[in-house]
């Protein structure tokens, strides 16, 4: 069941007291009590940020962005370190850089939440935090699973586990090595904080009976978020698949028979292209009308290593022909494309003239669909399975459409049509599956 996430009555009571009564209450406190009030976490935390009751070995907070997951993790570790001088804690993030910048030095990190006089000493060269009482915490990267083989710990905090590196099973290997070393003290425990993604490690935790789970949305912590931010994300994302995942903290599961799964897309993801391009194309799926579907505009490149990469999703919604043609031209210029590939089933002459009118001085290849969208997508999906495609970054709307394409011809993704996904299919087909010219020798 989702955790109720309202601000505690005790904090609201204190904040809502008339100024005179609040001053009188504070006056009755000692100097020490007043100083401690600002860092008394049980007073200010909302319910979803407090540890669950009962016996548990792991606590998973799977919630939307801005829920306060990092603060909850830091406060849980702080409480342990201040209470138990023998505690030996592992702090594990996707990389050592993120462990330091978010878990230790971030706005809600361990240094920021510590009260005056109880702040731990941080030694970056040793990746070590030491509290005045003697408790220690060491930073680890989930991208280096072997670094967790050997060290022993009594507690651990694992941050953003859904974004740990999936390549070569690194994420699960890091988790397993951590678990095998979590054997100090009378009751070893850990906390994992993350925004949901349908990756194997997160699914594994959700099925673990020894893990207590807190669900929550961005809006549970709206009292501590800028009002403009809350309004903006609610307007932009609402109940879209992206909004349900990133704001509501909902795990979006894969559809039965989907050509692409979210786990597969995570496996092929890289932060930036790791090979220089030898060819770059802008693929276009034009809309039938400006009031209908989006114009799918996707930039793809073939690398020197022979692997195709999706570089950008420049699609535009409800755009006139002039507007989407300009968007295509901008994408081609920004990514130094050598060709534009556009579906011409909606009128080849019209598509060509619209793109030419946008001063698009590039070779234009018009392609005609002789098969349905899903049938065209199937061989491209096979390229992903074979490790011949990478996604250089995050493309949530495009990826939602890919995961909605079903074997057998159906589509159950967002929108009426998978226009972004169709553009991707045309681009990767041009780069990888297109007809290759074979050199011929002329005998004169």
Image (cartoon, rainbow, N blue to C red):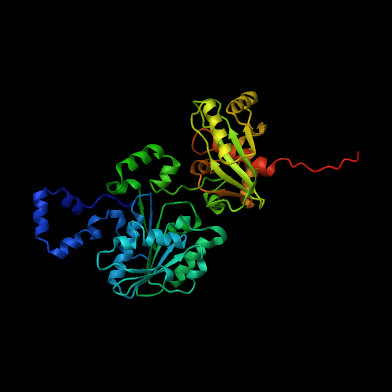
Q: In the image, residue 250 lies at what x, y percent?
A: 41, 48
Q: Quadrant of the C terminus?
A: top right
Q: In the image, residue 295 lies at what x, y percent?
A: 54, 32
Give the quarter of the image for residue 58. Answer: bottom left
Tell me the residue at 33%/39% (across/down).
231
> Does 226 appear above or below 369?
below
Q: Is residue 258 something one can see in this rendering?
A: no
- Residue sitting at the far right: 444
Q: In the image, residue 148 lies at what x, y percent?
A: 48, 69
Q: In the image, 101: left or right of 269?
A: left
Q: In the image, residue 411 lies at what x, y percent?
A: 55, 37
Q: In the image, 340: left or right of 324?
A: right
Tell me the residue at 57%/61% (across/down).
168
Q: Is residue 190 something one can see in this rendering?
A: yes
Tell me the residue at 90%/41% (across/down).
443
The residue closer to the viewer here, 4 or 275, is 275
The residue closer to the viewer here, 253 or 127, is 127
Give the quarter of the image for residue 102. Answer: bottom left
> Does 432 appear above or below 287?
below
């Amino acid at each position: 069941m989702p955790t109720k996430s309202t601000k505690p009555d005790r904090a609201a009571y204190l904040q809502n007291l008339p100024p005179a009564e609040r001053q009188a209450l504070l006056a009755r406190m000692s100097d020490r009590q007043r100083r401690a009030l600002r860092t008394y976490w049980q007073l200010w935390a909302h319910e979803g940020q407090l540890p669950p009751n009962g016996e548990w070995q792991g606590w998973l907070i799977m919630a939307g962005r801005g829920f306060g997951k990092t603060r909850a993790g830091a406060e849980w570790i702080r409480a342990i370190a201040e209470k138990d001088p023998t505690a030996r804690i592992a702090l594990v993030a996707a990389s050592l850089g993120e462990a330091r910048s978010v878990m230790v030095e971030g706005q809600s990190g361990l240094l920021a939440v510590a009260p005056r006089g109880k702040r731990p000493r941080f030694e970056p060269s040793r990746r070590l935090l030491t509290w005045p009482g003697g408790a220690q915490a060491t930073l680890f990267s989930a991208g280096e699973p072997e670094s967790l083989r050997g060290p022993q710990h009594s507690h651990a905090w694992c941050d953003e586990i859904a974004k740990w590196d999936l390549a070569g099973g690194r994420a699960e290997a890091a988790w397993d090595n951590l678990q095998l070393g979590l054997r100090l003290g009378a009751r070893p425990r850990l906390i994992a904080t993350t925004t949901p993604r349908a990756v194997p490690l997160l699914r594994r935790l959700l099925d673990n009976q020894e893990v207590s789970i807190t669900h929550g949305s961005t809006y549970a912590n709206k009292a501590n978020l800028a009002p403009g931010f809350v309004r903006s994300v609610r307007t932009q994302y609402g109940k879209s698949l992206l909004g349900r995942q990133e704001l509501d903290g909902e795990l979006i599961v894969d559809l039965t028979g989907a050509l692409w799964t979210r786990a597969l897309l995570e496996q092929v993801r890289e932060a930036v292209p790791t090979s220089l391009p030898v060819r770059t194309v802008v693929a276009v799926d034009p809309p039938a009308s400006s009031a209908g579907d989006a114009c799918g505009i996707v930039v793809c490149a073939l690398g020197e290593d022979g692997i195709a990469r999706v570089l950008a999703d420049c699609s535009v919604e409800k755009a006139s022909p002039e507007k989407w043609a300009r968007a295509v031209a901008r994408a081609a210029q920004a990514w130094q494309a050598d060709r534009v590939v556009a579906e011409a089933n909606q009128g080849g002459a019209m598509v060509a003239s619209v793109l030419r009118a946008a001063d698009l001085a590039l070779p234009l290849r018009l392609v005609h669909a002789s098969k349905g969208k899903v049938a065209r997508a199937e061989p491209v999906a096979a390229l992903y399975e074979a490790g011949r495609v990478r996604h250089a970054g995050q493309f949530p709307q495009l990826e939602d459409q890919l995961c909605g394409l079903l074997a057998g011809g159906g589509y159950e993704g967002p929108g009426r049509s998978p226009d972004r996904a169709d553009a991707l299919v045309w681009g990767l087909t041009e780069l990888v599956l297109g007809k290759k010219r074979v050199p011929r020798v002329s005998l004169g």
